[in-house]
Amino acid sequence: MAGVQNGFSCPAQRILYGSCYSGLTPSSGRPWPCVHVLTCFVQEAVINLRQLRYFTRIVEAGSITRAARQLYVAQPAVGSQMRLLEEELGVTLLERHSRGVRTTPAGDLLYRKALSILQDLESARRDVMALADVKPESLVFGVTPSIANVLGSSLLVHARETLPSVHLSLVEQMSYALAGAVERGDVDLALAYDVSDFPELRSIELLQEELVFVASPRTSSWMFGAGAVSITLKEAVSHPLVLAEGRDPLRKLIEAQARRLGYPFNVAFEASSNSMMKGIIAHGGAAGILPRGSVMAELQSGEFEMRRIVSPVMCRVMYLIERVGRQPLRTEFDIRQFIAAMVDRFVLEQGDLIHSRQAGALA
């Protein structure tokens, strides 16, 4: 048949033939067609690409826990996939020890093979997209500093792996700045707080996040009292506070709640960024009412102390926002799934400080 080479009728098929699993050959030394190799994998052991990606990430991270965080997947799910992989292959791939995991000889072999397979698939994907002249879609995605602080820099790495045909630019700003950027069209989608009243924005409520009272140990003894684990809102707003400027949704939320309850409100400092607020708190000049995510490192190091606010509990609402009339991308479903995985990871990290999680809101 004219135009058929190696049994394949189109250039894209020939690329896959030459790229997929090119390192796996039968005893004859001739390369197996990609489809035949995949069939052998399915028949002999049910190994899927997710398991290979999880496995390589675990080996590189040296820990299932760290790998799960980098993958934005719950640790039990990652551990379960590894158990299934070991059961299918009938060998032990990972040895557990006090600091994490290390590969067995079989695991070391699979790691090298898995890297080759994943690299070949990525190369095939790029070649096919280039052949079809498929242009990567661009997405400017915004998050607040506290969300970025919780999810970490691996957010972009995860995006590259799960959204290979999307060029993602990440913007980190305060909620009110993100809302303005989305309204202007400078940002396509964003995770922001308490911004549902912007008329030009479409917002989807995702969850409620509890706020906490934060101070330096230098001043916390008189603010909290010995052994205190909580503080009332009335006590919290009576202390000198550092807050964002007046248009910030968090500032508006705190002021509105204090006014509603008739509590005196003591704003000692205004700051335009999280880093400025944390600097003032660290010097003992004031306390803050903040999301825990924005001060996680300082809490872990002991630089700050935290108390939960009670009577009443203070919560803010996280929304996914976009401009009204925004046209969805070709990969919009995959983008929403990626954002849902981000939010799931955020919920897992924040634990019982998350309330009213709207499961399925991004479906």
Image (tube, rainbow, N blue to C red):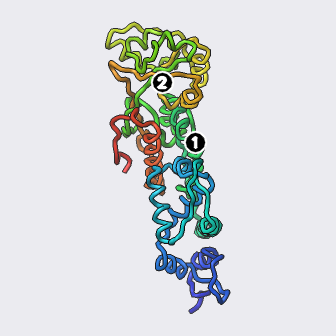
Relative to residue 6, is residue 63 depicted above or below? above
Q: Earlier in the sequence, mark 1 or mark 2?
A: 1
x%, y% of residue 247? 47, 21
- Residue at coordinates 32% horizontally, 12% vertically from top-left? 261
Which residue is most to the right? 29
x%, y% of residue 158? 56, 51
x%, y% of residue 168? 57, 48
The amino acid type found where label 2 is placed reads Leu
Q: Secondary structure at mark 1?
A: strand
- Between 73 and 93, the one nearer to me in the picture: 93
- Number of marks present in the image shown: 2
In this rendering, position of residue 293 left or right of residue 356: right
- Residue at coordinates 61% horizontally, 20% vertically from top-left? 279
Which residue is most to the top? 264
In this rendering, position of residue 122 left or right of residue 228: right
**Would residue 146 be seen by someone viewing this image from the given angle?**
yes
Residue 35 numbered tag:
none
Relative to residue 307, is residue 164 depicted above or below? below
Q: Which residue is mark 1?
A: 170
Tell me how far mark 1 sits from mark 2, CA to CA.
Answer: 23 Å
- Between 186 and 5, the one nearer to me in the picture: 5
Q: Which residue is mark 2?
A: 290
Q: Residues within 10 Å of mark 2 (few under 14, many from 20)?
A: many
- Between 309 and 138, the one nearer to me in the picture: 309
**Would residue 122 be seen by someone viewing this image from the given angle?**
no
- Residue at coordinates 52% horizontally, 22% vertically from top-left? 305
